[in-house]
Image (tube, grey):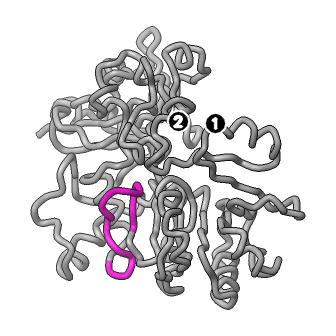
Amino acid sequence: MYFTFYSFVYIKVSVKEQKVLIKNTENGFVQIINNKIVVDYLASITPNTINYGVELTPESYSDKEVYEVFKNLEYNMCGEFFLGTADKAPIQFSPQLKIKNLAYTNDIPDFYQKDDSFSLSVLNDIGKNILYNVLELSIYYSTNPNPDLKEMNVASSQYLYPIISDKLLKLDCFESLFRYEYPKLSRINLILGDINLNDLNKINIILKNRKLASKTILYTTEDVYAKLSPQSYEAFSSIKVWNYWGADNKDIECLYLEKKLSQLISLENNKPSAEIYPLFTGDNVLECTEYLSYSKEDILVENISEDEIFINQYINSNFYGELSIFPDGSVYSRKNTPSLGNLYKDDIKHLLLLEICKYKNWFMTREKIEKCKDCVLNCLCPPITLLEIGMNNATLCTH
């Protein structure tokens, strides 16, 4: 029987003169180890092999001191033991995926079915640590039913812009999102296309009662904002209004969409208080390519940290950790892809497991793009965006 110890990517390992320094950059835990067996094992964990960990022989694993050292590292969230070999490593990234008594690698086993027996027998075995992967929730609570705005559906596929339809998320579905705690949740986006003020007041109460530490942001359009009173959004840390120039409240941030990219610089100069976003509509491909593309020289002069380079190799930081909930209850780990499931019938932990083990939209890196995968600069390039995907051109690089 072999056990493999997988070190998480946020662990820094430094080997000097038969000693190993272990530093957990997430929780501050630090330890110096001088056990020769452990040192030899951990010395083989380098940035190039960190995903695969080290395999312990039965003799090493049965050594009390070795066992206690590794178990202490596991206890302090520095890594995890799995039964098996390092040839088939589980997904390793920060934060960790923890599934009690189940070791998933790439594909979900055949028995993993969305039925009652699964919900009762397997779902409860999904460890709570899987919720560490939720960093941002974007909730499209209501839509704009105005048929004249259907052309703006492209905006909702690229940004936090209201969806154009007649759907409305039910309050009990909204509240069900918060029956779990999300330890790493840093931001909640509520996108309103139209709103019943009574519903919005209830949403305020739900958010205040939860006492969320995360930032809460309300996105809406000018016509909806005009209906709101300060009391209707008091639970939100900021308000962002699309295509609105007349904000007289310093707490209101203006956002603007522009499909004529040649006007972006002029708009930014004339409206310095607004955030200007390029909008791809399908008929401005050449203009988007001209104004948004970047060269090899642009990439090389960009100031990018070692951590960012490492992250770019494994996850897409534009998508990672974000779940989008549409008004019909469907849940997406990346817009413009098949939904993971629906909040009205699926458990959020179940949907997270599907994303991590099957769909893997959060892991859409340039290594997986045909044009980029063999480029030596791909780890320096910015992560792929929804705008690029919408253009059906996953890279705007001219290199």
The kind of residue tagged 2 is Glu
What is the secondary structure assignment of the residue under circle 1? helix
**Whether residue 122 is situated above or below residue 48 in the rendered picture:** below
Which image quarter is the N terminus in?
A: top left
Q: Is residue 293 left or right of residue 103?
A: right
Comparing 223 with 338, the one in front is 223
Residue 334 is a magenta residue: yes
Residue in the picture at 17% in, 70% down: 113
The kind of residue tagged 1 is Ser
Residue in the picture at 36% in, 66% down: 349
**Whether residue 256 is situated above or below residue 53 in the rendered picture:** below
**Whether residue 234 is situated above or below residue 338 in the rendered picture:** below
Q: Which residue is mark 2?
A: 287
- Please state the extent of the stretch shown in magenta in the rendering: 331-345
- Residue 111: tell me if it is visible: yes
Which image quarter is the C terminus in?
A: top left
Residue in the picture at 81% in, 46% down: 271
In percent of width and height, residue 393 lies at: 38, 37
Q: Is residue 336 left or right of residue 236?
A: left
Mark seen at residue 262: 1
In percent of width and height, residue 241 lies at: 71, 63
Image marks 2 and 1: residues in contact by CB distance under 8 Å: yes
Q: Is residue 296 left or right of residue 80?
A: right
- Residue 37: tell me if it is visible: no
